[in-house]
Image (spheres, rainbow, N blue to C red):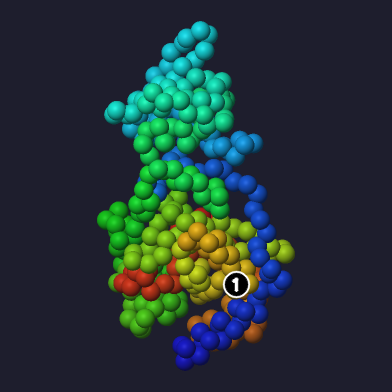
Amino acid sequence: MKKTFLTMLLSMLALSVLGTDGAEAASPKQVEVLLNANKLSFPDAKPFQDHQGSVMVPIRFVSEALGGKISYSKSGGKTIVEIRKGDDLVKLTVGQTSALVNGKSKDYGTKVIVKQNRTFVPLRLISEGLGEKVEWDKVGRWVWIGEKTFRNTDDAEFKLRPLSDFKAYMKERYFFNKVASNESFDGVKLIKASQLPIKLGDGEVIYDIKLQKNNGIDYIAIRSSVRGTPIFFMLRNDFVRYRTGVDNAFVNHKDGTATNYYPVRSTSDVFQNGKYNQHYDWTEFRLNMAEYIAFRTEHPKDYLVVMVNPFK
């Protein structure tokens, strides 16, 4: 019965998408800086990408995050900035494009500037000068510094919560069973969008989640390391809204990541608790009705990964 229900569900999902020829491009978003796969939070002046494509960052915050010590001085009416970390020394001058890195001159093609009362420098100058690897992620508009040591839902910071904590959301018990069997998950690991990127146990990495619109239809866009992991929306005292990625909207970024698009509203919602409800108006569903977004994956095998709805 459950297999029949799921087959019908997937068929309805295919019919729910109208005119999807790829999601519309989102407007350019804020540049994010990640240190060892953890996003840095900038309290005031934010990183930005200049007209040459260089990522500019407030020097003090990034230098100190990398373990460097910063000092300022004046010489000939110019502001000199020095950053030290162990045996590494970076010396630069506001208004110039070159810097001394361990005594050797390097030109980065972008001037050191003052903006919002903060000194901004090309990120690559600081990170390379202090001995860190740097990688520009043009898809996410992210700068990776250091190692990609992802958070993992297996880590101790993510506590296993009993399924009973989510009883109000389990009107359809089937979705809270392990993917490879009919046994219940051992519990739930709760994550937040602010903790992305994150690796789901021994499975995929979830990089980003956002809301996009295409041809007037709302989609959840999830960038991850795999294709097609189903998700479902969890509503209090109501049935779940199950979603699979739209095949002809899938984007392979050819960098080890891909973006899957899931319709917010779907005709599949006429199937509830294994039964077809022809009178149900599936168009009335709104994303802010869901408390959580769950990932229907067999990795990890023993617990369900659930994200607090960032769009609520």
| Residue found farthest to the top | 76
Q: Is residue 240 above or below residue 42?
A: below
How many numbered marks are there?
1
Please name whichever residue, 210 or 186, is drawn nearer the observer in this view of the structure: 210
Locate residue 174, reporting x and y percent: 42, 80
Q: Is residue 251 left or right of residue 192?
A: right
x, y percent for residue 220: 57, 62
Residue position marked by numbered label 1 in the rendering? 246
- Residue pictured at 56% horizontal, 56% vertical: 210
Mark 1 residue element: loop
Vertical side of 95 occupied by 267: above or below = below
Give amino acid for label 1: Val
Mark 1 packing: few (<14 Cα in 10 Å), some, or many (20+)? many
* Image spot of residue 310 (x, y percent): 51, 55
At 49% from the left and 15% from the top, the residue drawn is 79
> Residue visible at 35% across and 52% down?
149
Can you tell which quarter of the image residue 169 is in?
Answer: bottom left
Q: Position of residue 29 (x, y in %)?
A: 59, 46
